């Protein structure tokens, strides 16, 4: 089993809205979480112990700046499932980049275009393999 940490500026709160929910924030949050799950799930089944948690203020190292951000950890069934060209998260970055998201939720930065971005200069989501 391998564990990964996600840090994102996109609101991925797992709000679990009821079918009758009309709150667009809750619906958008869950949609973003579901989109991330589906993109990760292209290559591996995952499990997690805690839902994403929102923080305000300074981003965790090695990132710089201040913003609302979400931190989440998940586990995969197999080791190195996202490895390509000696990058342990290379396939994960490829799969998640440009996946559409709902913007205008509890994020404190403008997500434009409304997609997850993994490319360095435009990134709004980062993945880290846990050792």
Image (cartoon, helix red, strand yellow):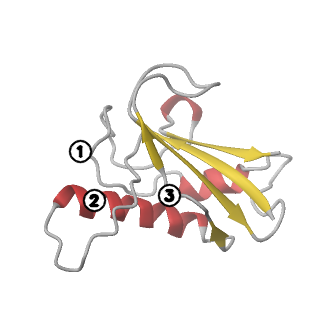
Left or right of 89 in this view: 122: left
The quadrant where residue 67 appears? top left
Residue appearing at x 35%, y 63% in the figure: 30
Vertical arrangement, residue 43 with respect to residue 64, above or below: below
Q: Residue at x 59, y 64 (%)?
A: 40
Q: Quadrant of residue 39?
A: bottom right
User: Which of marks 3 and 2 precedes in the sequence?
Assistant: 2
Does residue 20 appear to the left or right of 80 in the view shown?
Answer: left
**Residue 105 in picture, x, y percent from top left:** 26, 47
- Work out whether mark 3 precedes mark 1 in sequence or the reverse, and give the earlier one: 3
Q: Position of residue 19 (x, y in %)?
A: 23, 80
Image coordinates of residue 112 in percent, x first then y, are 32, 39
- Of tags 2 and 3, the one toward the viewer is 3
| SS at badge 1 | loop
The first of marks 1 and 2 along the sequence is 2
- Residue projecting furthest to the front: 49
The tag on residue 28 is 2
| CB within 8 Å, label 2 to label 3 | no
For disc 1, the marked residue is: 104
Residue in front for this viewpoint, 49 or 39: 49
User: Residue shown at 38%/57% (left/top)?
Assistant: 100
Left or right, 131 with reference to 129? right
Q: Are marks 1 and 2 in contact (CB under 8 Å)?
A: yes
Q: Residue at x 61, y 71 (%)?
A: 42
Query: Along the horizontal axis of the image, is 126 left or right of 17?
Result: right
Alpha carbon separation for disc pair 3 and 1: 21 Å
């Amino acid at each position: 089993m391998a564990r990964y940490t996600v840090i994102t500026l996109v609101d991925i709160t797992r709000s679990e809205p009821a079918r009758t929910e009309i709150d667009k924030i809750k619906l958008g949050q869950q949609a973003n979480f579901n989109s991330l799950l589906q993109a990760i799930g292209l290559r591996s089944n995952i499990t997690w112990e805690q839902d994403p948690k929102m923080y305000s203020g300074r981003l965790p190292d090695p990132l710089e700046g201040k913003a609302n951000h979400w931190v989440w950890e998940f586990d995969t069934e197999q080791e190195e499932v996202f490895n390509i060209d000696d990058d342990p998260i290379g396939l994960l970055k490829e799969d998640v980049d440009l996946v559409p998201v709902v913007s205008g939720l509890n994020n404190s930065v403008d997500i434009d275009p409304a997609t997850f971005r993994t490319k360095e200069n435009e990134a709004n989501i980062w993945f880290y393999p846990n050792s």
